[in-house]
Image (spheres, rainbow, N blue to C red):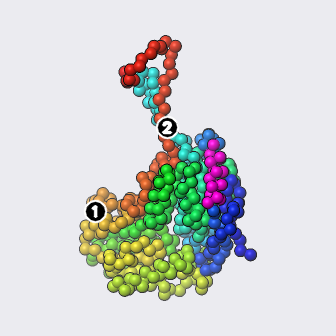
Amino acid sequence: MTETLDHWISGTTDPGEGTRTGPVYDPALGVVSKEVRFATAGDVDRAVGIAKEASKAWGNTSITKRQQVMFAFREILNQRKDELAAILTSEHGKVLSDAAGEVARGLEVVEFACAMPHLTKGAFSQNVSTDVDVYSIKEPLGVVGIISPFNFPAMVPMWFFPIAIATGNTVVLKPSEKDPSVANWIGAALKEAGLPDGVFNVVHGDKEAVDALLTHPDVASISFVGSTPIAKYVYETGTAHGKRVQALGGAKNHMLVLPDADLDLVADSAVNAGFGSAGERCMAISVLLAVEPVADELIGKIRDRMGKLVTGDGRKGCDMGPLITREHRDKVAGYIDVAGSDGATVVVDGREGKFEGADDGFWLGPTLIDKVPTTSPVYQDEIFGPVLSVVRVSSYTDGVELINSGPYGNGTAIFTNDGGAARRFEREVEVGMVGINVPIPVPVAYHSFGGYKASIFGDAKAYGPQGVEFFTREKAITSRWLDPSHGGINLGFPTHD
């Protein structure tokens, strides 16, 4: 009998009232491993109600006690990270080493949240007027909603909930229905760490659950990561219902390679950034802009490295795993056909490889396409798979203009040994996260993550200082304690005398 994964509400598994379920696949085997329950609007309403009730006590819990829970959760996560990585691999498909890396990057934000007593200190100004002081405090919002994607089922929720919880909020998380088990594991680990019931809740489901969170009057904010069209919908719907929204969208990340770059470093970086996690990363490098005359030599080096990659079951020591579903695999593979019809050259065709796994796995090997026209959907669309496109440009200026002309502005990188060119690039490129000889410039936890243009909707980036600001609201207090000698009535306008 197939296992059914329930919601996690008020510190325990909860089947809810809904009868709909969805399949959860093991992508390396191509089989359904379990079913996941889909929440109704009523299920979401009940979870939000429980979180709202829990927020009364949790918001008034001392910051020291909240910090102790974060420290305990950090220890549990660190001790059992291999267990979590194995669950992640079984439902997403990424190789175990990549899954462990995902957990480690999420752990960084947990550790950042352990410093919340310092991060939520207010400001104080003494004697702004005679015997009058002004000071500010940071307060929690209440109930916050998180909607996370399939590609990072552990890391992306951890971009948000540790900061939200440490600042005194309660959480309702709606993870991807494609790989939902990680969210329940996190819920159980937080309970073990001492988090009170109702502070962290998980509702599984599809658009019905998403819309219920976006429109619920008791949800104060929404944090979202996903494709640009859905991010735009989440932002517009959430803000129309009076919520704070941070909605991170899609990307088409370029790597600009100048002629003076170390081409061996570039080739290694392009393979790592293009094919890690089967290209299912919003920070994956999907376009390599080669400033001539380096393209032919660079393509040869990349092709040689691709020939040594092993694609297969992530539990068996392979370099790259399958894609998340058969439908997604077929969609990504379709772009290889488009490339040929648009006049590009398919240098390495990932459909033709041999795979170390079950015949029914959702396989697509690393793919390299040269001379991709910028008018082709292969260049314009976010493919979200192991497809690396090469576009040849004649100069640094042409490369920057091409990057800046695109609709996205998530991540980019330049590879060069010219410090002046690198400094010029960081100023001129219109992208939120920039790497200099670093292919995937994801900021560490004490900075903030987010892009420009259609890669983000709303003003707040994820985690770091902006994450703290997003999950708190500032209250300014003007205070005067009068001594016994005061007196008299003055109806005039108060001044700073």
Quarter holding the C terminus is top left
Residue at 27% x, 77% y: name it: 293
Magenta-colored span: 41-56
Q: Position of residue 344 (x, y in %)?
A: 35, 83
Residue 374 has which mark? none
- Residue 10 falls within the magenta-colored stretch: no
- 48 inside magenta stretch: yes
Query: Mark 2 = which residue?
Result: 475
Q: As drawn, which residue projects farthest toward the top?
A: 485
Q: Eyeballing the image, is 193 above or below 434? A: above
User: Which picture quadrant has residue 190?
Assistant: bottom right
Q: Nearer the viewer, residue 400 or 132?
A: 132
Label at residue 421: 1
Where on the picture, by quarter, is residue 43? bottom right
Q: Comparing marks 1 and 2, which lies closer to the viewer?
A: 2
- At 47% from the left and 53% from the top, the residue drawn is 239
Q: Is residue 299 left or right of residue 201?
A: left
Q: Residue 264: give x, y in percent of width and height.
A: 38, 73
Is any part of residue 310 visible from this angle?
A: no
How far from the left and from the top, in percent, is residue 327? 53, 78
Q: Amino acid at mark 2?
A: Lys
Identity, as a three-letter code, of the amino acid under mark 1: Ala
